[in-house]
Image (tube, helix red, strand yellow):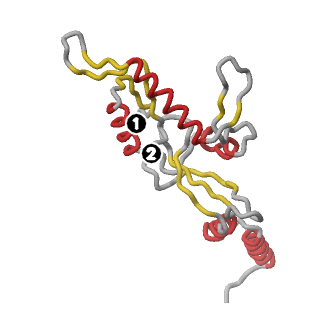
């Protein structure tokens, strides 16, 4: 048997009590902390998305509660970086980390708005009306400004009075389809915000 003085016994006993108390308070190794976080998000729906702020295109994970029914309105409760995303590997800048404030901002537009020429007030309109209005304005401008032949008489079909800017939040496929659509209409002024 190990010989222990009274002072040594009190030190060992005190250290044991302190260690077990810290473990009971939550300062345990990684497994207990991971379980606490899992419990917070266990009832949520995880959705992958792209941060809308800049042209880097970082991946984010959005966690939402609710199913859209009357008694459970869907709401995003947590945002974090996507560790599986090749651009940011789970990290977010300060703007991306505060994305939940952007989502829940009372000033955030959720529907298209229209201000009549000479008007001072913006009026909410439906997406169908907004897309029809944009398509009509684009067609009218193209019909009025299309250059079918150049000075040499060669067919060029150029539309120089309108341009297009593609967003950084879109995928490569969306950018490709946007580029093909814009070029098929004869539009030459086209740029993509993404610089990656």
Question: Which residue is depicted at the point 49% across and 33% down?
Answer: 135
The answer to which of 122 and 37 lies nearer the viewer is 122
Question: Which numbered circle lies on residue 109?
Answer: none
Spot the residue most to the top: 151
Q: Secondary structure at mark 1?
A: loop
The residue most toward the bottom is 1
Q: Quadrant of residue 118?
A: top right
Q: Sequence order check: which comes first, mark 2 or mark 1?
A: 2
Image side of residue 146 versus residue 95, left or right: left
Residue annotated with mark 1: 196
> Vertically, is 108 above or below 114?
below
- Image quarter of residue 133: top right
* Badge count: 2
Q: Can you say which quadrant of the picture contains the C terminus? A: top left
Q: Front-most of 28 and 133? A: 133
Circle 2 is placed at which residue position?
Answer: 87
**Residue contact at pointers 2 and 1, CB within 8 angstroms:** yes
Q: Residue at x 55, y 43 (%)?
A: 51
């Amino acid at each position: 048997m190990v010989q222990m003085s009274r002072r040594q016994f009190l030190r060992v006993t005190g250290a044991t009590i302190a260690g077990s108390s810290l473990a009971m308070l939550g300062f345990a190794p990684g497994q207990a902390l991971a379980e606490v976080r899992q419990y917070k998000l266990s009832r949520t729906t995880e959705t992958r998305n792209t941060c809308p702020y800049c042209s880097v295109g970082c991946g984010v994970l959005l966690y939402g509660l609710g199913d859209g029914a009357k008694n459970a309105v869907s709401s995003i409760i947590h945002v974090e970086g996507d560790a599986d995303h090749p651009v940011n590997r789970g990290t977010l800048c300060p703007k991306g980390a505060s994305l939940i404030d952007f989502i829940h901002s009372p000033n955030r537009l959720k529907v298209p708005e229209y201000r009549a020429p000479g008007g001072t007030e913006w009026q909410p309109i439906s997406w169908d009306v907004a897309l029809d209005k944009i398509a009509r304005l684009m067609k009218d401008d193209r019909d009025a400004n299309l250059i079918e032949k150049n000075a040499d008489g060669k067919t060029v079909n150029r539309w120089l009075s309108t341009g297009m800017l593609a967003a950084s939040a879109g995928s490569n496929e969306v950018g490709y389809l946007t580029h093909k659509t814009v070029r098929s209409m004869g539009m030459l002024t086209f740029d993509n915000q993404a610089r990656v």
